[in-house]
Amino acid sequence: MSMVRLGCVLASVVTLAGLVVACSDDDTGTTGSSSGSSGTSSGDNGSSGDNGSSGDNGSSGDTGDKCQLAPGTYTTTYTTKPGGTGPGGGACTDIPSSDIEIKESTGDGGTAEPGEGCTIEADEATCTVTTKCTTTTSGFTTTSETVMTNKDGKVTGTMTSKTVNDADESVISDCSYDFEWAKK
């Protein structure tokens, strides 16, 4: 699985503070996306079927790719970083652990493209993907960043999400998380 596609998979699996992220597959036109409220994890979008991590959206087929993640089921564990502010001024919501299935590729899977308002930067030398998004919905702007690294088959990273009220620029939520994928 290419690092850019892996970045799209993670971005489409995790939802923070109303964040909307989408990555599409040029070959099939399918899209993996997620949206919702603070601290929730979406299992419906991005982790199964034609969307996100499984189905036809696999790796480039290059088995020698040092950044490629081995097929299988991974448990994603999130740790809420201290000092953030959740909705209503409370603590940031903990994100529950979830499983992600990476299937073996049967083709090149196309090229991952970032959703509207998002950019993806891949550093093949360090196997790191950075996904940055800015979305505005109903008078609220959410900026987010996910940095993930696949080193020796282990995926680790950080996610941040900040939502502000556009009318008065007050901060609605500002949360950060560390995450790790462990193969079952």
Image: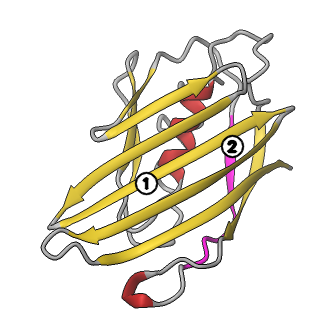
The image's colouring method is secondary structure
Residue 118 seen in the current view: yes
Residue type at tag 2: Glu
Q: State the residue at coordinates (15%, 66%).
A: 138
Q: Which residue is mark 1?
A: 144
Q: Is residue 97 magenta?
A: yes
Q: State the residue at coordinates (83%, 34%).
A: 153
Q: Is residue 29 above or below residue 159?
A: above
Q: Secondary structure at mark 1?
A: strand
Query: Which quadrant, please, contains the N terminus?
Result: top right
Q: Is residue 85 left or right of residue 104?
A: left
Q: Residues within 10 Å of mark 2 (few under 14, many from 20)?
A: some
Q: Quadrant of residue 115?
A: top left
Q: Position of residue 79 (x, y in %)?
A: 70, 68
Residue type at tag 1: Ser
Residue sitting nearer the eye, 99 or 113: 113
